[in-house]
Structures are given as C-alpha cells and as structure tokens.
Image (cartoon, rainbow, N blue to C red):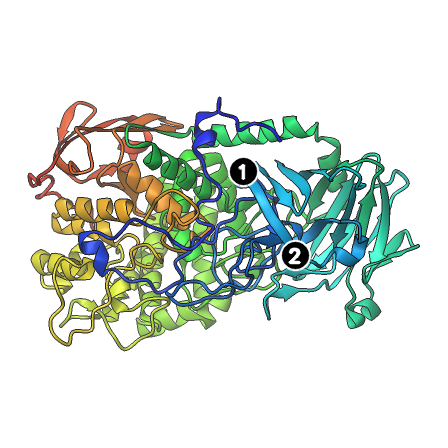
Amino acid sequence: MPDKPIDLPAVSRVDPFLGTAESDLPDPVGIAGSWWRPKPPVGNTHPGATLPFGMVSACAYSGAYVTGYGRYALSLDGGSPPVEFENHEALGIAHFQQSGTGRIRSYYNYLLTTPLGADGLEGRVERRPLTDEKAWPGYYAGRIAEVEFELAALPRGMRHRYRFPEGVGAHLAVELSAGGLLIEGMGSYPQGGGWRITDEGAVEGQVVMEGIPVHFHCVAPGAEGYLWEEEEEIEATRYEVSLEVQKRQPTFGFAFRGGGRDIELTFGFSLREAERCRVAVASASDFDRIARSAAESWEEVLSKVEVEGGADAQREVFETAFYHSCIKPADFRDENPFSREPGPFFLDLSTLWDLYKTQLPLMMTLWPERGADFVEFLCEVAQREGVFPISYLMDNTPDRFTKQASGLCHAILEDARVRGIEADWDRVLSLLWRTSQSGKGRKGRFGEYARRGVVDPLSHTLDLSYAHFCMARMARGVGHQVIHDRATELSKHWVNAFDDQTGLLREDSTYYEGENWNYSFRFLHDMKGRIRLARGERRFAALLDRFFGFDEPEHGERLFRFEGLNNEPDMEAPYAYLYAGRHDRTAQVVRRVMDCQFTTGPGGLPGNDDSGGLSSWFVWSAAGLFPVCGQPVMLIGSPLFRRATWHLPGGDFSVVAEGNGPNRFQVRSAFLNGEPLDRCWLKMEEFLGGGELRLEMDEESHGFAAESRPPSY
C-alpha cells in the first residue's frame, strides 16, 4: 500500500473516516446542553475513494444504511442508530455512493466487486471481516478476510488492486444484479441491460438501474474473464437482462481469475455510451500514479482555503470538513443520459435544501467556472422537465422531495449572479419566471402562493417569498421592470406565515424535521420587517436567547431548542443575532457549536453531513465568515483560527484574528484593508476582490458593530 502523502499537507490532515460512526462529541457545555436532536447522531459519511466533485466513488460494502458502508440499520429519529450487522464486515467493493445523506430512496452501490476464496462463487454472498482500513482523499484500502484491497479514483472510473493470500489464486466476482442496500425496501434490481466479453478479454456493456443506463468497461490484465448466473459459471460470452430474466430475478454478473495472487481491475463508467468507458480505461496509468494524481487533485482543491493557528485537532476537523464539502455535487460533465448532449451535468443534489445555504455558495465562491457549469445545468433541467429541481439523483424520477422545500434554485441562481458567475442572466430569469408562473409551477405551490399569499407547510411560504425576492433582484440587474415589479409584490407575503403575537412562525403547520421555532429565524430579505413583527430588536434577541438556551422557558411553554447542527433547518440562526446588533451572541453560539458539536474521529459529526451541507457550515464559520444565499453580503462571525486565507479568483482575502483563543472569541474591533470597520458584514465585492479583514479578539464583549445591521431589502 502507498504511504500517506505527507508532502501534501492539506491531504495528510484529512480523516475520511470522520462521520462514519455514531457521534462521540465533547461533553456539552453551557447552552449546548439544552439543544436537541431530531435525527440520528451519525454523519453517514463513507471513507471510500473519490475525486473532488467526483463522478465515481468506491467503498467497502456491507449493505448497511445509508451509504452501504458500516453496520447501521434504518433510523429516522434522534436516538442512537440501531445496528443492522453485529460486526464490521463487507461483501466487497461497491461503486457510486451518497455522502452524508438520510433516507432518500436511491442508494446506488452498483457493480459490487467481491474477492473470492477457495469456495469460489458460492462464498460470494458471505459477509466477511473488514479490517486494516486506511484512507486519504482519492485513496481507500483495507482487508476483506485475508485479501488486501486498494482503490484509487479516476476521473471517470476506479482502479482496484488486490493481493490474495499465499497459495490462493486471484479470483474476483462483479455482481450486476443488485444495487442499493440490504435493508427491506432499499434495494434495486436492474430494469434492463446487457454485456459481453470482448475479444481482448475485457467485459463491457450496460446495466439499467433506477431508469439510468450505467455503461461500463472493465479490464483485468493477465486474468481470464467469464460470466455467471446464480453463483454458477455459464458458458456464454454475452448476457441480456431480458423480460424473462427480470421476471425470474436471478443474481448475475461477471468474474476474473488469474494465475497469481495479485490482480488489478480498471473500471470505466459512462451514462451515455461504451466508447466513453473505453477511453476512461485506456487513459489510466499505473496504480501508484493514479493514487498520487488523485491526492494531488485534492491538495489543489483543499489549498483554496488555508488556515493558521488553532490546535492540531481543529485543523484536522477543518480540513476534513472542507474535504466533505467538496465531494458533492458529482460532476458528470458530458454524461447527460436524458438529452445525450455534451455539456454540464451534475448528480447527487440529494439535500438541496441544505446545500443552498452553505455548500453551493462555497463552491461558487472558490470555483466560479464550476459555478457557471452548475447554472447551465439547472437551466437545462428546467428546460427539459418544465420545473427547476428540489433535488437531483441518479434516477429518472422528476419532482423529487417536494415536501422539503420550494423555489430553492431561485435563491441558488441569484446567489451565483451576485458572486459574479458569468451566465446569460436574461435567459436564466426568463426560465425562472416562466417555470414559476405557468405549467407545473402554476399548478403547484407557486400558483397557490400567487393566488392565496400563503402555502402549507408554512416554511414553503418563506421559500416562495424569498424566491420572488431573488427573481426581483435578478430582474432589476438585467433591466426587466415588469418581472421586477410583479416579483417584488409577491415577495412580501412572508408575513402571512408568522404569528404577530408570538413573533414566531405559526404553530398550525407541519415543519420538516423540526418545529416552528427551528424555522422562525431563517434569513429573509426583509429582516427589518421580520424584527418589527417580533416587536423590536430587543424582543427578537430575547426569542433567540430562549431558542439557544440562554433563558429557561416559562412554565408550560412549548419551546423547541436549536438543533445544534444535528440537522440544518436552523443552521443560519446563530447569525440572526447580527440583525439585532448582537454580534456578541453570534460569537458565543458559533464558538459553542464548533467546540461541542465537531471533533476528530469516526464520531466527529453531530448528525448527517447531508452532502457537505453540515461540513461547509464549519468551513465558513471556522474561517470567520458566513454567506447569505442570494444576497451580496458576507456576515462576520468569530474565527476559530489565527488566520484564514481564501485564495479567490479576484485575489487573496485573509481573515486575521489577533489574540484569538479558546476564551478570546469576542471581536473588540475590526479593520478592513487597514481602515476601521464598525459593521458585522462585508459587501460581496469587498470579499471577492481580495484584501484583509483584521479582527482584534478579546474575552469580553465591547459592543462591536452594535449600531451596525446587515442590509435589509
């Protein structure tokens, strides 16, 4: 196995196993002891090999919830995750995984590759001990029973390397008849496909999973390939998943056996055609070079934000959070299986209602060219499906996850625009307006919102109000007065979701994975109006104090606390204090979250990482800033490190926290490019253009930015 690339400092600090087990966090201190968790306390990450925003991943597979890796069963509440498998074991190596999600219906884990023992194919279905695991970005290795394995990620494929025990010939089986998880209701069976052994000894073809054709080309130099069904070798060199086969539902696949104890496999994948798979395999070099190239790709990505100071453990958590923030969305450029046309295409937008707040702003800030691709991709989906997506998975099911949120792409696209992403914004606005005012939009929640001024769940009223604000801002930017005026009027209906007596969202609604308190402090475009509805800044801050646990609830009061990033509906709430002039409270809460809810090791996350939505919160907050999706501002928080440098296309931007320490998290004074700054936010151009924000830190609050309020539109 290659040595860990210690000459790549960012890569060497990443722990891909962080978040793979039940939370094992520091004891909660102070207000953190009052926070609650609606979901299982486990990150649901996996340690498998993949590239930044990689098309392909591969990891040891046990069939457990939710990535296929590990031991856990289905769990949906805040208790400890139940155990499905008693021991840490694996059936083999599967390809394509989610990262940090919950129950999302489509779980991938295709082309399960199993090292076989002396009992051959008959032993393929036995789960065996998984030991000696090691991983770093782009590389994953371990031992299944007595067989050593290594994986290194390719741009459109995966390289496997196996070493069998002395006296045991190399023998690998690849199953094509299953996907998903080994949990009731969570497996997949092919809807079609076919493959063959080529004259050169490779195996190529396609298998249709969840309505998507997964083309593959697999080579194992020096090994003999054959096909199998129901754990028995068959004489054929071709196999078709006919209607008769689908009715019988046998197991099937292909295998390779070699004369020695070592064997390597190279997989190439495509969602469009076999030729693209062949090219992916032909361009691959030797294993060690592939592993090194993958690590260097990650080092380039992870070097975009560099931190100095802090403890070793804090830097490890930061680098790992940054790593998890850059796994999804998966970039399938030129692989659109629907249009079959070249161009941007992304998958695994599994939790867009989380990603839009922190992870996508991070991606668009650091990689505007990828942001431009993402804009084009969203527009292609809207053009083809007649509606912008709420999520997007490797399946052919439109209108996914409509109960979670509405109108998210409106905020995402306006956020791309204010971050300077280049696009045809006239076309984007036209698509946004047309899909919200006609067709599926008019028949759905957009139409109901326009007619009634409110929709249920009430959190969707906030979504749609904000979506119209984002369209109004975009219309103003491109000079479309009619859309601007109409969207501006429709953006005002957020007030209909609130109870003006309590200052909170009304209780007569359902709230996805939370309660009205957890959604009451979301960022709105009219925060002045929101605070006025709560009867002023002092009372708004008092509501936040109760929410975070600074004050005890009154007897009999129905109060749901902050979820402590066990889940993300209230992930921006710590920064809501800034709109009431209480930067000191933001600093207290943000630091308490970073100290108590994140740590090193497999149990280092407080809840599902949700495709990097959770981890990217940590990246922003630890570096001292926080985005407001769809608005041209960056909020100033309480940095964890002495210095954080963002290497941006417009120039480096550094956040320097002088005198920073575990108890010195309050900002006494601030300077932007050497000039005094008495506001708790930056204009987007101040951030993107490069510069230096210097914060003088102290143990006590000195009323920093007490007279400052972020913009309210």
Which marked residue is nearer to the observer: mark 2 or mark 1? 2
For disc 2, the neighbor class at 10 Å (few under 14, some 14 to 19, many from 20) is: some
Q: Earlier in the sequence, mark 2 or mark 1?
A: 2
Direction from residue 533 to residue 231 in the image, left or right:
right
Disc 2/disc 1 C-alpha distance (Å): 21 Å
Direction from residue 349 to residue 658 in the image, left or right:
left
619 or 292: which is nearer to us? 292
Residue 137: x %, y % from top left: 52, 36
224 or 176: which is nearer to us? 224
For disc 1, the neighbor class at 10 Å (few under 14, some 14 to 19, many from 20) is: many
Q: Amino acid at mark 1?
A: Ala
Residue 475: x %, y % from top left: 36, 50
The reply to whether callout 2 and callout 1 are in contact (CB within 8 Å) is no
Q: Quadrant of residue 517?
A: bottom left
Direction from residue 446 to residue 440 in the image, left or right:
right
137 or 452: which is nearer to us? 137
Q: Give me the residue at 8% from left, 39% from top.
A: 700
Q: Give me the residue at 9% from left, 63% from top.
A: 535
- Which element carries disc 1, helix, strand or loop? strand
Q: Give me the residue at 29% from left, 43% from top.
A: 626
Q: Quadrant of residue 285?
A: top right
Which residue of the protein is positioned furthest toward the front in this rendering? 167
Q: Quadrant of residue 599?
A: top left
Residue 526: tell me if it is visible: no
Residue position for label 1: 135
Q: Amino acid at mark 2?
A: Arg
Which residue of the protein is positioned furthest toward the right in this rendering? 235
